[in-house]
Image: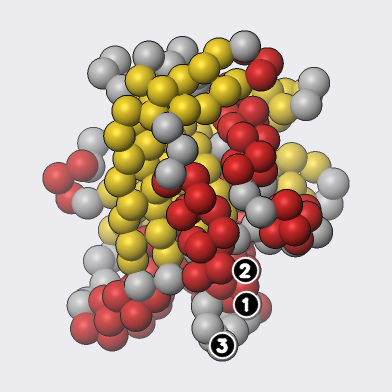
Amino acid sequence: MYAELLMNLKGSTLDYRKTSNLQGIIMEHIDSEYAQKLHHNSLNPYSQYLQVSKENVIWHISAISQEAYEQIILPMSYIDEIYVKKKNEKIEVQNREIKICRERELLREFYEVSGSRYLNLRFMTPTAFKQNGKYIFWPDLRLIYGSLMRRYSASSEGLEMVDENTLEELVTKSEIVRYNIRSVSFPLEGIKITGFCGTICIHVAGTDTMARYARMLFRFGKYSGVGIKTAMGMGAMELMERRQEQ
């Protein structure tokens, strides 16, 4: 299962540059043994980021497994206040909402709904990848698809999605045909990682099955995030519906 907890932080002055602090708050409120288990995971079963507007600051925490839902989403849903030590700031949680998506819902759409040939993605927080020891801060389709496939495979119940032939087919049949992105720095533990934010439009050629598969991965990406440091606030993404297109 996939779950998303949305918490309205009343009067918060936080923005995406402080979300690495919020990971520490999560660790403080969950079971210590589970927190230690997360520390040793190569792929985290959760992601989090801040959505900041003039009216609200919404903290999104997502889980991509039943265990992460029970161990992270549920405990965090009961807190009424968070304390950010580095800012010496107490922030009231004004209201909260949990949204649930079952894996079978994505699979049902995959099998029953034809795939759109044009898929619009929005990257809300700085997104980057690491390859051969170097940070990559532009929307490389191989890295985007590969990241999502690994996360989906790790979270799915018995489904192996990491397949080099499928990845190669996705990359070969996909093309970025429109983009509006910018480079953005993400401060982290005394350093700054450069990532990208903005929107891209991907055209998927090939079979309808390939277009459906790409759509399923991008819908899943709303919960998993994409790229590096998604547990610290990077790599928040969503598949935009037509009415959201710009």
- Residue 156's x, y, as percent? 52, 78
What's the mark number on residue 150?
Answer: 2
Task: First in sequence, mark 3 or 2: give its number.
Answer: 2
User: Along the horizontal axis of the image, is 33 left or right of 155?
Assistant: right
Give the residue number, with chain letter if any, for mark 1. 162
Q: Please, what is the three-letter code of the amino acid marked with disc 3?
A: Gly
Residue at 46% x, 54% y: name it. Answer: 74
The image shows residue 147 at horizontal and vertical percentages of: 61, 60
Q: Is residue 131 visible?
A: yes
* Callouts 3 and 2 close, C-beta under 8 Å: no
Q: Secondary structure at mark 2?
A: helix
Image location of residue 67, percent across then percent down = 56, 68
Mark 3 neighbour class, 10 Å CA radius: few under 14, some 14 to 19, many 20 or more: few
Q: Is residue 104 above or below residue 71?
A: below
Task: Please tell me whether mark 3 sits on a helix, a strand or a loop.
Answer: loop
Q: Which mark is residue 158?
A: 3
Q: Is residue 195 visible?
A: no
User: Quadrant of the rendered structure where residue 144 is?
Assistant: bottom right
**Residue type indicated by callout 1:** Val
Side of 227 where 82 appears, left or right: left
